[in-house]
Image (spheres, grey):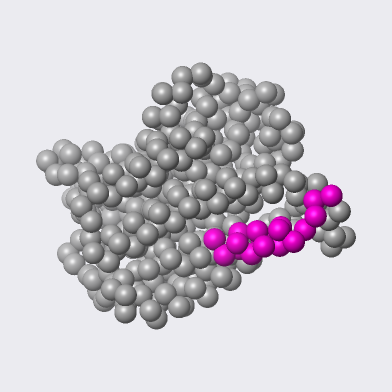
Amino acid sequence: MSWLVAGSLIPSLVICWAAAWWVRRVGPRWGLVDRPDTRKDHAQPMPTGGGLAIWLGVVVPFALGQVVLACLSPESPPSWIPDVLAMHLPGLIEQSGRLWTLLAGGTVVMILGLIDDRRGLDWRVRLGVETLVAVAMVWDGWRLSLFMDVPLLTGVLSVGWIVLLINSFNMLDNMDGLSAGVAAIASTILAVVMLMVPDPVTNQPQLFVGGFLLVLVGSLLGFLIHNRPPARLFMGDGGSYLVGYFLAMATLSATFAGSELPPHAILAPLCVLAVPLYDTATVVYIRLRAGRSPFEGDRSHFSHRLVELGMTKTQAVLTIYLATATCGLGALLLHQVQWTGACVILLLVACVLLLVAILETTGHRDG
């Protein structure tokens, strides 16, 4: 399994790291610059085309892999290919069409984000394009099953899930290293789950989804080299849309329950993504309560509220990393426990979020 981890992580990390250097140089010429204002934390104009680097870190390794795959014969693979990979060559060829459909959708939302970074788009346009992409992907067969034969309901929920995660990671992108770091933690945990939970049909680890997530992790780590505090490059809307879309599609592609797996294991993505979803829910609530549009930017995010409690920005980001990991680790056990154990895991996640909410409320009352 080490060959899968290294082969997925290292190429995407190096490609994204190198591409980010290039984006830092050419981004400002293309108008991809985030200028400071009263609701932003940076004091100087910052290149904001990091989403393009993340996209290249994911797409280029798969493109190179596709070329190699086209040169191989599944019936007689060369000896240098590990046996565990050789047995999956027919499956890789079969799944390559779906992979490029997934990447095509990601390309659309990344370009949408770049245009938003460059010109600024009305929220209705952004939401409309995101919904169209989500509908196209669901129409192509990417959807939640939820153990029910109600295509309309599962289709609507799947579209809502994709759009929700796109916007959740966009909202989370408000401090150096935050959105990319949380996405890297979530993707890593989900990848581990995929390699631990066998596919009900083949009874083999879910290498396709796990490998995709590891490639995403590598690209995010390459970007974080440039985005860690103090950041030299922002991912921008192009990056946050892309990351949210990829995580949504990975969770729709994965099998968390079924056959010999307990049905409650399907809740694993909610554990892993609990913190971004908490941030989105609380930000939308705060804005609506104040009579503002939920799409109007402000400083009401989880990270900003932690800073108001007296934390530094770095401490706030690390706290959110830790909360993400704490909630997400429960997903590693959901497929191994009965309902009582699953309830304990879900209660643990809820307690972490309630603890954060109580601390935030206390901080506001004291202020």
On whether residue 241 falls in the magenta region, the answer is no
Residue in the picture at 58% in, 23% down: 263
Farthest left residue?
Answer: 291
On whether residue 73 falls in the magenta region, the answer is yes
Residue in the picture at 55% in, 51% down: 100
Q: Nearer the viewer, residue 146 or 309?
A: 146
- Disc tally is 0
Q: Position of residue 184 (x, y in %)?
A: 51, 55
Q: Position of residue 106 (x, y in %)?
A: 45, 53
Residue 108 visible somewhere in the drawing: yes
> Which quadrant of the view contains residue 290?
top left
Residue in the picture at 52% in, 75% down: 18
Q: Position of residue 115 (x, y in %)?
A: 30, 62
Q: Nearer the viewer, residue 366 or 157?
A: 157
Q: Is residue 80 left or right of residue 127?
A: right
Residue in the picture at 63% in, 31% down: 335
Q: Is residue 280 left or right of residue 96?
A: left
Q: Nearer the viewer, residue 208 or 43?
A: 208
Magenta highlight range: 59-75
User: Which SS type dominates the magenta stretch?
Assistant: helix
Q: Is residue 17 left or right of residue 73?
A: left
Q: Position of residue 331 (x, y in %)?
A: 56, 37
Residue 191 visible somewhere in the drawing: no
Check the image and report above or below for 277 versus 46: above
